[in-house]
Amino acid sequence: MERVRTQPRQRGFTLLELLVAAFIMAIVAALGWRGLDSVARARDDSQQRMQAGTQLQLSMQQMRADLSAASDGGQNLPAVSLAGNGDLLIVRRPADPLGSDMRAWAQALPPYAGMLEVVRWGIRGGRLLRWASPPAPLPAPLLQAMGRPEGAGIEMLDGVASMQVLVYRYAGTGLQQQSGAWVSPYTAANVAQSGNNPLLAQLRTPAGLRWTLLLTQPQLRGSVQREFLLETRQ
């Protein structure tokens, strides 16, 4: 009698095993997606923080440039002062289109020689703005710019809650400049000394400025303080 040989049955996966495998794969995929999402968020936060830091640095550089060119314009045009609403006012020499190298102009004078402009720094709606008046050789348009900003200001930094300005003023002049203090530009020493006398201009112009900003951005939060020297002080 001949025996019939049967092929052994190949065992497959049960439905329960397939469900368990699919569940494990779903968990692994979810964990992997969360990891990728965290990496992408961290990258975006790092880029935003870098952009905010760059914008803050550019604002500080512009303030340094304004103060390095600050110049007393005579009566009612001090080099540094505060407006009634707290805006910082800087009377400065305009920047030369070709830089400070006088050789670029051969024997001619720069186009803005002898002129001044008024730069205003202020906060509007949580934004730090900067205005600059057109260069002028006469005090009338400069005084008008001291009274109110002209045109739309340029946004320098977003997320600024407040701004505080102090100036460093010596107690005397010449050899008597042995001590000084950080005071508000609203003090009488800044507004009472008027006239075009060079000595009075020296008394009006402070030796330094301390600038404090309160930042509210998620990437830049807290207080930032910088101190600047007025290099053009007479």
Image (tube, rainbow, N blue to C red):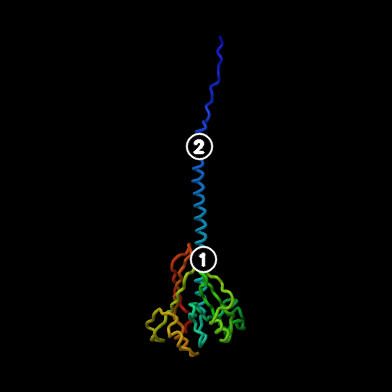
Residue 102 higher or lower than 221, as above or below: below
What separation in Å lies between label 2 and label 1 (alpha carbons)? 49 Å
**Relative height, residue 5 to residue 17 (above, below):** above
Q: Residue furthest left?
A: 178
Q: Nearer the viewer, residue 93 or 146?
A: 146
Name the element at disc 2. helix
Residue 72 location (% of width, % of height): 50, 84
SS label for mark 1: helix
In the rendered image, which residue does mark 1 sit on? Answer: 54
Query: Quick check: 113 left or right of 221?
Result: right
- Where is residue 226 drawn, in percent x and y? 45, 72
Q: Amino acid at mark 2?
A: Ala
Q: Position of residue 179 (x, y in %)?
A: 37, 82
Disc 2: which residue: 21
Disc 1 residue type (three-letter): Thr
Quadrant that contains the N terminus: top right
Above-or-below relation of 1 to 43: above
Residue depth check, mark 2 versus mark 1: number of the one nearer the observer: 2
Front residue of 179 and 152: 152
